[in-house]
Amino acid sequence: MAKVKKQPRPKAEPPKGFRDYFGPEVTQRKAMLEQIAKVYHLYGFEALESSAVETVEALGKFLPDVDRPNEGVFAWQEDEADWLALRYDLTAPLARVYAQHRNDLPTPYRRYAMGPVWRDEKPGPGRFRQFYQCDADTVGAASVAADAEICSMLSDTLEAVGIPRGDYICRVNNRKVLNGVMEVAGVLDPADPGRLSHERGIVLRAIDKLDRLGFDGVRALLGEGRKDESGDFTKGAGLSAEQADTVMAFMEAKRSDGPATVARLRELVGASETGKQGVQELETIAELMDAQGYGADRIEVDPSVVRGLGYYTGPVFEAELTFEIHDEKGRPRQFGSVAGGGRYDDLVKRFTGQAVPATGISIGVDRLLAALHAKGRLHAEVRGPVVVTVMDRDRMAAYQSMVGELRAAGIRAEVYLGNPKNFGNQLKYADKRRSPVAIIEGSDEAARGVLQIKDLVLGAKIAETATHEEWKDQPAQREVARGDLVAEVRKILAGEA
């Protein structure tokens, strides 16, 4: 009789490109989302939660570096009918929601949304296939004042979460300006916008990689192509040297101040009406920013910003952190971009057939958290619950009464629910939980109406530096009346003990 092959155990690990988030990380993210939501709410935006799953048709073909609608997204077919996919951002779902409910929504519609998105892309260090975004968008406002408001709100948001002025810059450009430059370069024909769209896509993605590839790498992608360090070859846009010179001049158009940069852009767009309109919009944004007190130390015009997504039609924005961090090899580098967005006037039109102006911003929450950690402004340590230890199994009701009192007073607390036989293991558990306080009450303490309170934070500090005699004195542990439990714990938590 053939031996039945034993089924191997599944590997206890997440899929490639995904990771698990534990208590402190989740708590820190929640706190950051609350800070961001406060700023968005202050600006008059309302919350929206849309489905994590959309039809592939609704999502559309807008991801960078992909050629097919379902490439770059996690998609599957439902009952041999519609293809469904996990959302790759929060903007495409907004377009569907607005088109569906536009008769019931105010115009303009100002909404913010927060949640995970998924990209079926090659993962790398710090680059995961699931990550959090935090968006704010205005739908139905054609005025460039809506774009300017997004810029000011982005600046206020970064400062609210702990990025001070001087450690970030919000950079603004306009896709109309780039389109005007591509007209001049012969890569865009206003009479036939669909022609050369593939080449323009390569140009856009190449410019968007400037910070990673440098000017030489982008120049190579504008021409025949580029071979990376691994030997992989990426085919370029096939532009002539003269065409590439025009595009590169656009990327190098930034000058010492905003007016000088705008003047250079006006030269580059030449007679292009689209380009002229884009330059005028940049001037208007700069004027509105200046009127509100947002100077060049917070928001600046930068032609190198283009954004990789294909649905942008006008102003585009990017927030970059300017302080230095060190990579895994100890080399200094700037942290880079943590937010981006822009105007996308044709996205809702896919559903309605009518042009609906829209503009918005998306903040990469995980990258922003990583930046605060790297700068030492966010600590991994998050205080755990007070742990009530179990000295006598028969007195579990008394221990539960203690945690009930602590919780009623708003103090996070729990009873040790493991095997109480080894008291040392209970204290080790409290340490793993990052507990600030342990409560100890045996039958002797109960008979006398007292309990022991152990300040675990102070105890850990004493253990690091104290002599043996000092340690024996146990200054981190003291006896208090049972009725003073809540008051004494509050003192310790407030740093008053």
Image (cartoon, grey):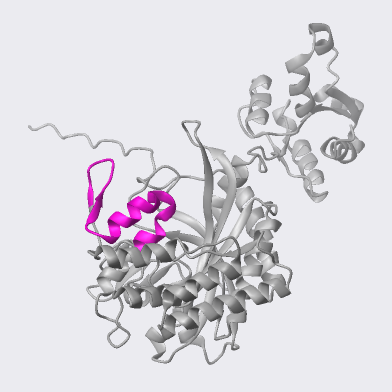
Q: Is residue 298 above or below residue 458?
A: below
Compared with 489, 113 (above or below) is: below
Image quadrant holding the N terminus, namely top left
Q: Is residue 269 left or right of residue 395?
A: left
Closer to the camera in the image, 282 or 244: 244
Q: Position of residue 324 (x, y in %)?
A: 58, 42
Q: Does 223 lie within the magenta span?
A: yes
Q: Main secondary structure of the magenta part?
A: helix
Q: Residue sitting at 66 percent across and 28 percent down?
A: 431
Query: Quadrant location of the C terminus?
Result: top right
Q: Is residue 423 left or right of residue 259?
A: right
Residue 9 % position (x, y): 30, 36
What's drawn in magenta, residue-wise? Answer: 204-233
Instruction: Judge from the rendering whether residue 294 lies leftward or rightward of residue 116; answer left or right.
Output: right
Question: Above or below — where is 331 with respect to 324?
Answer: above
Residue at the (22%, 64%) spot, across then down: 238
In this rendering, the count of numbered labels is: 0
Can you say whether 250 is above or below 25 in the image? below
Q: Is residue 49 visible?
A: no
Q: Considering depth in this image, is 28 or 370 the residue closer to the camera?
A: 370
Residue nearest the viewer, comparing 248 with 300: 248
Q: Nearer the viewer, residue 320 or 434?
A: 320
Residue 375 visible in image = yes
